[in-house]
Amino acid sequence: MCRHLAYVGPPVPLSDLLFEAPHALARQAECPRRQTSGTTNPDGWGVAWYVDGDATPDRYRTVTPIWDDRAFADRAHALCSSAFLAAARLASPGASLVDTGNAPFVAGGWSFSLNGVVHGFRDGAGDALRARVRADRLASVVGDADTEVLFALVLQHLDDGTRPEDALARVVREVLAMTTGRLNLLLTDGTAIYATRVGNSLVHRESVVVSEPTDDAPGWTDVPDHSLVTMTGHGTRTTAL
């Protein structure tokens, strides 16, 4: 049910973590080792990357599986960034297979992804979640993906002055109060990474938070289930949800 990755650190080519590491995002999308649901992630992918001096990230999304996207793999060698968020998609049942339904979703300086699913999203839970979103944020929801609605809720909490990590935790609680699901939320503003683990795998090392390790080298730390991880320039902190 999707693989995703966020990086914040010294500038690196996007190709390093997306395509060239031994178990880069492209590899774990096609041959995941720790995926809870599904055996591959063939329904497209996307990446948002931050360029110095720009208030909002650049973004690329496609319905082409990441492991078949040779054109962007070649381009990624020349794209260096100190922060990016990428996701390979296994679409939830009933969701439209269009590039606009793929993470990352972007608003202002924020980029967001969901590795998971809101159970019953097309059977009432989605309508209940949309009802919690104010009109100004709901107007920006253009597709039928559960991820986009969750992002609108996160943004709404950020608008109200909630800290990013608390905004993610609040959305997880709102969803679980009405239904079940797997809720690995991933958020960055290009300077820090915020992520929840609920029901799917998540690890971190140095400057990376990712669904599963990108190599077999030591140093990876598993994020406990039902936890939230915050990675900033001051270090990484994990707390229980």
Image (tube, rainbow, N blue to C red):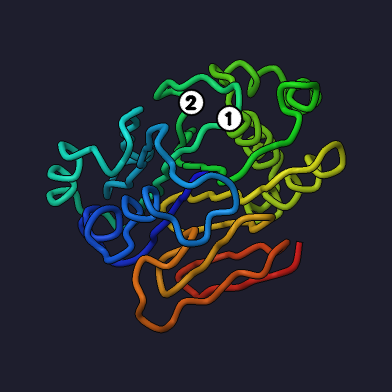
Which residue does the image show at 65% across and 56% down from the upper left? 165
For the N terminus, the image quarter is: top right
Left or right, 6 with respect to 116, comes to left
The dot on residue 225 is none
- Residue 54 versus residue 237: which sits nearer the camera? 237
Determine whether the residue tagged by mark 2 lies in a helix, strand or loop: helix
Residue 34 at what x, y percent from top left?
52, 61
Residue 235 at what x, y percent from top left?
51, 75
- Amino acid type of the residue that numbered disc 1 sits on in the rendered structure: Glu
- Residue 200 versus residue 107: which sits nearer the camera? 200
- Report how far apart the C-alphas of labels 1 and 2 lie in the structure: 8 Å
Q: Is residue 206 above or below residue 108?
A: below
- Amino acid type of the residue that numbered disc 2 sits on in the rendered structure: Gly
Toward the bottom, the furthest residue is: 218
- Residue 233 versus residue 225: which sits nearer the camera? 225
Toward the front, the furthest residue is: 39
Q: Quadrant of residue 122?
A: top right
Which residue does the image show at 74% across and 47% down from the upper left? 172
Quickly name the residue at label 2: 101
The answer to whether mark 1 and mark 2 are in CB contact below 8 A is yes
Q: Is residue 84 above or below residue 227?
A: above
Quickly name the residue at label 1: 148
Q: Earlier in the sequence, mark 1 or mark 2?
A: 2
Q: Is residue 199 above or below residue 113?
A: below
Which residue does the image show at 39% across and 24% down from the upper left? 99
- Residue 93 versus residue 203: which sits nearer the camera? 93
Which residue does the image show at 58% across and 64% down from the upper left? 230
| Label 2 Cα neighbours within 10 Å, binned few <14 / some 14-19 / many ≥20 | many
